[in-house]
Image (cartoon, rainbow, N blue to C red):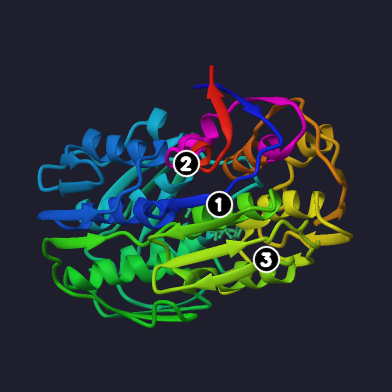
Amino acid sequence: MNKLYIEGSKKLQGTVVISGSKNAALPILFMTILIPETIKISNIPELTDVSIAIKLLKHLGAKIIQKKKTLWINTKSINIFCPPYYLMKKIRASIWILAPLLVRFRKAKIFFPGGCKIGSRPINLHLKNLSKLGVKIILRNNCIMASVDNFLKGTSIFMEKVSVGATITMISAAVLAKGLTIIENAAQEPEIVDLSEFLNKLGANIKGAGSNKIFIIGVSRLFGGSHKIIPDRIETGTFLIAAAISQGYILCKKTEPKHLKKVLTKLIQSGAQIKTGKNWIQLDMRNKIPKSVNISTSPYPGFPTDMQPQFTLLNSIAQGKSTIQENIFENRFLYVDQLIKMGAKIKIKKKSIICTGVRKLYSNNISSSDLRGSATLVLAGCIAIGKTELSNVYHLNRGYESFSRKLNKLGANIQNT
Ligand code: UD1
């Protein structure tokens, strides 16, 4: 699937069932390398990024059985510590294979990871902090070679910058290290909490996940067990936007409202009526055009950068002028030119996206450049006047399970080539 044809002027409304979280599933999949016993993981989203992670594990020698959204993974027979370039370059999350391989084999050789074009995305914090646990790192020919003499040693780490990825790397390196590791200025995302709960179920001793200070007492081994992946908060937010921009209503089922507090606050400010229950969120625009909202992205519990493009779309058809400041990734604006091609009035000034709401967007031939930008452009096509042709849509399947099918059930008309 490389192109989508999207009929516009649609109201998107109805019920959608939210899938498991991509960003929680990916690190958890790689953590299975730490445990040479069978682990059952359920609510796995069916996504290309996830299938690449599974391919990586299989390439190393893991035995994996998949039944629908449940995986049984046994990494006992892993005997390779150098995953291949063609898989590593496909996903950013492949960096999380480094620490588990290192812990298991005392050495690992990986290629630099790939991922969305949303900024420079360095991995210096992963590497620098691993070396504080006693890891020797050599960088050569696009490769990271890491080794440890005897065992990883617990230590205190202060993260220079709040990083989801580096916090995950440090947790995975510390669970089986000797002694206590303290991570200060840690990322607090729900995906970090899910990872820690997963590892604790298998015998790890991690406390404080979800706060900015995480304590990990190294244990001698981990055991097999099972875990259910949390719902995808970004998928949830994207579907809430779908209803908000088309003046519709939506019921998102099997989600976690607590993970979307900042997103829901902004939707309420934009005029949406929101109701929540234990595992559902309902949004009703009551046929009203949204009001524009000002946003500044920041690490959790702040407003998520992964919802920035979708809110830019909302602002581009909302009443009034607005500013969204992107503080996490320096180049997360590539989709903006495509919205401008559709009639949006948007200006980028340094790291701010300044929108003046227009009454309508118009179809065009557009192209997507990254995951969240792609989803945003699909939604733009659903409300634009005319038929939009969107190319490069492979990004979508990386992070949204059955996105077109779910939207079509809500009233969209999206066809593949
Ligand atoms: C993860 C998510 C991504 C989300 C992002 C921020 C996954 C697979 N991806 O990405 O969807 O947008 O969190 O919520 O879960 N940084 C450094 N050095 C490092 C690492 C990061 O300078 O070694 C910087 C980054 O350039 C960025 C900031 O820290 O400016 C945050 O990045 P980080 O939280 O690490 O994002 P990812 O883990 O890559």
Q: CA distance from mark 3 to mark 2?
A: 21 Å
Q: Quadrant of residue 167?
A: bottom left
Q: Residue at x 35, y 46 (%)?
A: 45
Q: Report the residue marked by disc 2.
A: 406
Disc nearer the start of the sequence (1/3): 1
Crowding near the residue tagged with mark 3, few <14, some 14–19, many ≥20 C-alpha atoms within 10 Å: many
Give whichever of 53, 20 is nearer the camera: 20
Residue 272 is tagged as 3
Disc nearer the start of the sequence (1/2): 1
Q: Is residue 291 left or right of residue 417?
A: right
Give whichever of 372, 26 is nearer the camera: 372
Residue range in magenta is 380-405
Position in image of residue 50 (x %, y %): 36, 42
Q: CA distance from mark 1 to mark 2?
A: 9 Å
Q: Is residue 140 visible?
A: no
**Cβ of mark 3 under 8 A from ligand 1:** no
Position in image of residue 23 (x %, y %): 43, 54
Q: Is residue 173 visible?
A: yes
Q: Secondary structure at mark 2?
A: helix
Q: Is residue 300 above or below residue 400?
A: below
Q: Are marks 1 and 2 in contact (CB under 8 Å)?
A: yes
Type of residue at label 1? Phe
Q: Is residue 354 left or right of residue 398?
A: right
Type of residue at label 3? Ala
Q: Report the residue marked by disc 1.
A: 239
Q: Secondary structure at mark 1?
A: helix
